[in-house]
Image (tube, rainbow, N blue to C red):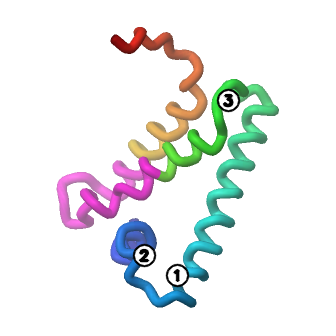
Amino acid sequence: MDNLPRVSIYYHDVGRLSSPRLREVYRRRKAHEVWVVDMIRLAQQRGEVDPELDPEVLANCVFGTQIWLYRWYRPDGGDSRDAVVEHVTRYALAGITGAGAVDLPAVP
């Protein structure tokens, strides 16, 4: 939230970077993704997250929740930074820890 323009470039405009810079961004992104997936796997081993769920899919859900902030969050908007952080954090954690506990209706 403190670097919204950078996050925008990092995810939205990444293809516009030079080849060397693009490789560096992808290297950093992959390291970050691996770390989050490993954290989810650890939570699965501890029984905090449903082990039936794919940790890579869950990680992508978390990233989607956090990254999309650059599209809608405005520091001068109505919600405080702390309130938005609280909402996003609770939403992401509830999505990971409670994802297996929901009975979904059959898709028609």
Query: Disc 1 marks which residue?
Result: 22
Mark toward the start of the polypeptide (2 vs 3): 2
Depicted 15 relative to depicted 60: above or below: below
User: Where, quadrant-wise, is the C terminus in this rendering?
Assistant: top left
Query: Disc 3 marks which residue?
Result: 49
Q: Which residues are magenta?
A: 64-85
Depicted 51 relative to depicted 86: above or below: above
> Would you say the residues marked 1 and 2 are in contact, meaning their CB atoms lie under 8 Å apart?
yes
Query: Disc 2 marks which residue?
Result: 14
In the displayed structure image, the side of residue 38 where residue 87 appears, left or right: left
Mark toward the start of the polypeptide (1 vs 2): 2
At 27% across and 60% down in the image, what residue appears?
71
> Residue 88 placed where, x, y %?
42, 46
**SS under mark 2:** helix
At 68% across and 66% down in the image, what residue appears?
31
> Residue 63 placed where, x, y %?
49, 52
Nearest to the observer: residue 14 or residue 46: 14
Q: Is residue 63 magenta?
A: no
